[in-house]
Image (spheres, grey):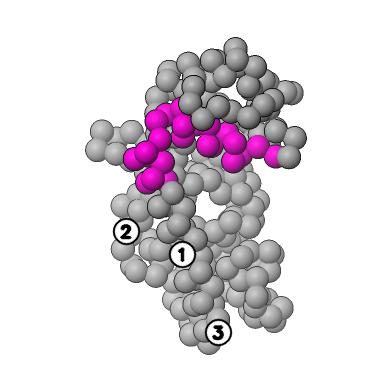
Amino acid sequence: MLERVALFSNLEPQQIARLESICLERTVPKNTLVINEGDETDCLYVLLAGKAQALRSDDSGRQFVVNRFAPDDYFGEMSLLDRRTRCATVITKTQCTLLILPRKAFFDFADAHPELYRNVIGTLLDKLRKATQQIEELAFLDVYGRLARLLTESQNADGIIEEKLTQQDLADMVGSSRETVCRIYNELVDGGFVVKDKGRMRIKKKLPFNF
């Protein structure tokens, strides 16, 4: 299982087996609160099956989607390392199966296999780059620009966005209101840029830079 996870992909089979033996497996239903922002927890989570998302709250209590998780993704490594409170809330979007690795077990294993620390550094740098991009988008792009980038980056080779996203999902992901996203989306549909294809969105032609 863990050999498919980027964080552990370069470990030897016997190392993977040892690591899996010290993890706890848990299956939870849709809409389960896995991590609550501000909590003190000490585990790394690996998503084996299902979908989940991470959210942050602003001062008014409104939540924004800051990350989405699919099978073989993992989360919780930052608080695992620095012992600070959780910086985001994680909620399951579907029924999920998780592997849970406690902090002590993680460090005991990593101390014996230092290559794991290099993997962690690499993944943290990737997340830092992504966070920097999100900050730039909020600073320099308007709602349409953020939505257009999201749709463009989410499409497959045929222009189809495989995940069924509601307009509220899109609003949460670009940091806007559902009403604003609904208006922009309808204008894209009217302009022939986006269509519904078997319940999924499909981009028919390149979205304009400005709209």
Q: Main SS type for the magenta part?
A: helix
Labels 2, 3: front one: 3
Which is more toward the observer, 94 or 5?
A: 5
Is 5 one of the magenta-colored residues? no
Look at 33% across and 67% down and name the residue there. Answer: 83
174 vs 28: above or below = above
Answer with mark 1 or mark 2, whichever residue precedes in sequence: 2
Tell me the amino acid under the disc marked 3. Answer: His
Neighbor class of circle 1 (other Cα within 10 Å; few <14, some 14-19, many 20+) is few
105 vs 160: above or below = below
Q: Which mark is residue 85?
A: 2
Look at 38% across and 45% down and name the residue there. Answer: 136
Q: Residue 25 is drawn in which quadrant? A: bottom right
Look at 65% across and 70% down and name the residue there. Answer: 9
Q: Is residue 172 left or right of residue 92?
A: left
Q: Which residues are magenta?
A: 134-156
In this figure, which residue is indicated by the disc labeled 1?
A: 125
181 vs 174: above or below = above
Marks 1 and 3, how far apart at CA = 20 Å
Neighbor class of circle 3 (other Cα within 10 Å; few <14, some 14-19, many 20+) is few
135 vs 23: above or below = above
Secondary structure state at the residue bearing disc 1? helix
Name the outermost residue toward the front.
Answer: 209
